[in-house]
Image (cartoon, rainbow, N blue to C red):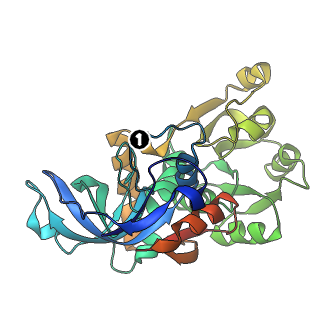
Amino acid sequence: MRAVWYDRQGPAGEVLTYGELPTPSPGPGEVLVRLATSGVNPSDWKSRSGRGRPMAFPRVIPHSDGAGHVEAVGEGVPRQRIGQRVWVWNGQWRRPFGTAAEYIALPSEQAVPLPEHTGFAEGACLGIPALTALHAVLTDGGVTGQRVLVSGGAGSVGHYAIQFARLLGAAQVIATVSGEAKAAHAMAAGADHAVNYRSEDVADRVLALTGGQGVDRVVEVDATGNAPLLPRLMAPGGVCAVYGANGAEAAVNFGAAIMKGIALRFFIVYELTPAQRATALGALAPWLERGLIRHAVAAHAPLADCAAAQDAVEKGAYIGNLVLDC
């Protein structure tokens, strides 16, 4: 099969190889998926570059997200799954070989049925971006009737989080963005307001938009940069669901935080419990079936251009997801 891999960490153009590798076979409880697409996420270039993450395996095929057809099944998996359209999660988490290839063999439950009217490009956006966004708004009781702030509302996760907060009955959704184009993107997803964090005082603006009450839920992409603002812009008893940071540490004013009783809920989508993942998948499936979700596939690239694609994601070159065609 054609695939992209690396045997050492470093710059994409120096360490990524495009060539032929043996096609895997599904083991017991596994399915073999012929991949049509592979989603490129920030975690992919971070792992490949070695940014605080040593090589976990001697050889790695990158990327955790993808979509395609089930081509074969292993022992214990119903043969009726052959031919099924599926999307994949955790393709390269605690496993050496991910979705930057023509085929992937992985546990059957990690290949989720994909509705006919949802394209393979869109399916390659669900594993990390959509499930991260969904868990962030579902955890700790959900957001029904709440005021929600989505940090980085034009990002891959933020774009889904705005929509999911709306679908779950949030009373108000506010997004932070860095420019007019991103503001338009967030508003199109369903945000009531977009706050430009480069030109506005985010906490002051959020308080003004919420009538001085603050928000009940924050979906946070950068705890390092934004944690100091949380006690100011959050309502008493609010929850901040943290899935990312641009540094190794985040500082919160303890006195202000404890007086409001705010909570920080840290999580990483790769390590959701079976119950948490089942809850997220259960919510996502009917929305996909009914066509209620807007996806943001910004660009396609051939599998052979994986290095350039990872570089583009690292530079933030697109508003939306970049997908490789396998």
Residue at coordinates 84% horizontally, 48% vertically from top-left? 202
Q: Which residue type does callout 1 highlight? A: Leu
**In the image, residue 233 above or below residue 153:** above
Q: Residues within 10 Å of mark 1 (few under 14, many from 20)?
A: some
Q: Farthest front residue?
A: 14
- Asked whether residue 43 appears in the rendered view, the answer is yes
| Left or right, 50 with reference to 184 | left
Residue at coordinates 76% horizontally, 40% vertically from top-left? 226
Report the front residue among 270 and 191.
270
**In the image, residue 83 above or below residue 242:** below
| Left or right, 26 with reference to 121 | left
Dot 1 corresponds to which residue?
272
Residue at coordinates 46% horizontally, 40% vertically from top-left? 55
Q: Farthest bottom residue?
A: 117
Report the front residue among 191 and 301.
301
Q: Position of residue 145 (x, y in %)?
A: 60, 50
**In the image, residue 325 above or below residue 307:** below
Q: Position of residue 85 (x, y in %)?
A: 28, 73
**Which quarter of the rendered picture does the N terminus lie within?**
bottom left
Report the front residue among 263 and 107.
107
Residue at coordinates 64% horizontally, 55% vertically from top-left? 171
User: Which corner quadrant of the image does residue 193 belong to?
Assistant: bottom right
